[in-house]
Image (cartoon, rainbow, N blue to C red):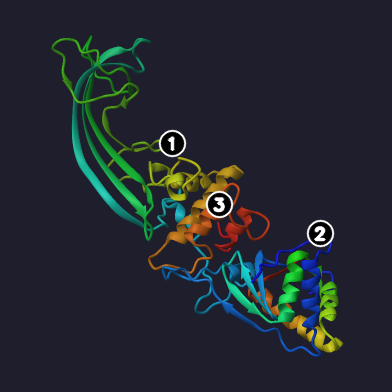
Amino acid sequence: MSNQEPQNQGKTKEEADVQKRRRFIKVAGVAAPVVLTLANRSAFGQAQPCLSQQISGNMSQIGQGSCESGMSPLEWKGPNQLGTNITDFTEVSTVGPTTDKIDKEVEATFASSDLRGDRIRIISETVTTIKTYKWYGTNFIYGILTTTERNTSSITRISDGTSIMTEVMVTNPDPNPAGSPNIGAIISGQKFIVGERSEYTGSNPLTTWSGIIPPAPKCSDYTGGTTFIAAFGYGSMNPMREFLCKLDNPNVNSANKLNAYRVTAMLNASYDAPAINYVLTVDQVKAVSATPPTCPIPGDDLSTFLRSTWLNRD
Amino acid sequence: MTQHAIIKTAEIRSIRWDDDYVIYNQLSGDTHLLDGISGELICALSEEAMSRTELLKKLNELLEVPSELEMENYLDDFIARFQKLGLLDIE
């Protein structure tokens, strides 16, 4: 058997023979085209890839074996800025709450301090809880939410014993004079204020609040998570979640937007609770997302194609 | 479909046995067994995109006593069927 490659050179003996065979199939009349299809099926019995259906524009076809659209980037992004938790998470682990006491003499700057800072004593208690989440239906870690609740009972200037009620920023956490209290750990740059103050530690921008009820966390309040390179085998070392978070910015650049779409496609292809007949398999997502792609991209560009697999929803 | 629409195939590999063609669609991974006429047309389209008029002319070359009505009907069926299978793309 021979593999007939398209040939554009002048006729060779082989090409002449091919032409002779082609003329042989001339028929007097012709019935309808006859075609039998052996559909591509995963060796592991997973949902049948339906890329051909998507290419032919039949995404709206329903019925057994039909393509299903995936979830949109917004649906995978997680908590939005309004605090509505769209995405389902699975809590992977909880560490804490752990309580750390601070009773420490440090140097810090504040509203009425010297420029180089004054020596103060901080008495505070911090309760920290660390929760790790993954996207429901996948094995990718969404991120870590670290909640730090701090109750600072007093901040006192050493030189005159006055209470400092404004925010202080530590400039030297370990002046460590003999006999001074030295309980707990403080890092340079850390801020304290008398009263209760909580934060999602590591959030960017930093989310803080006073009181018992924390605000609903949003995408940027989390840290860490499965990185792009861990999921794809190449590319950025930033967490997958961060590319989705960037979609909150109306001026997000095209490179970050495309990475967000790649992440969305990977999550759709990986989802198994239950598995959907998504247009792309995990391997196909990796292939079309590579630079350069290791398999052809249907249509004009990757961004347009990927958006079509969740019906162009945001 | 207008007469000026361009018809082209997906990325394919093909093998011919006697009058049958086996076509492998690299994008979908599907494998298709085609009759001789369909196979010739698909292979011709894999070499270059064509308009419907050009494809009709190609079909005419493959038929001994072509009837215009038969050719038009065949071509309509061919395009519809293979577009649905993802083997053809029309612009």
The residue type indicated by label 3 comes to Ser
Mark 3 or 1: in front is: 3
Q: In the structure shown, which secondary structural element does the residue marked by tag 2 occupy?
A: loop
Does the image show residue A132?
yes
Q: Given the image, on which type of amino acid does mark 2 rest? A: Gln
The kind of secondary structure element at disc 3 is helix
Q: Residues within 10 Å of mark 2 (few under 14, many from 20)?
A: few
Q: Please give the residue where the numbered disc 3 appears in the rendered image.
A: A289
**Viewer-proximal residue among B79 and A1:** A1
> Which amino acid, mark 1?
Pro
Residue A9's disc is: 2
Residue at which label 1 appears: A205
Q: Is residue A297 above or below residue A64?
A: above
Q: Are marks 3 and 1 on the same chain?
A: yes
Sequence-first tag of 3 and 1 = 1
Crowd around label 3: few <14 · some 14–19 · many ≥20 (10 Å): many
Between the C-alphas of marks 3 and 1, the distance is 30 Å
Q: Chain of mark 3?
A: A
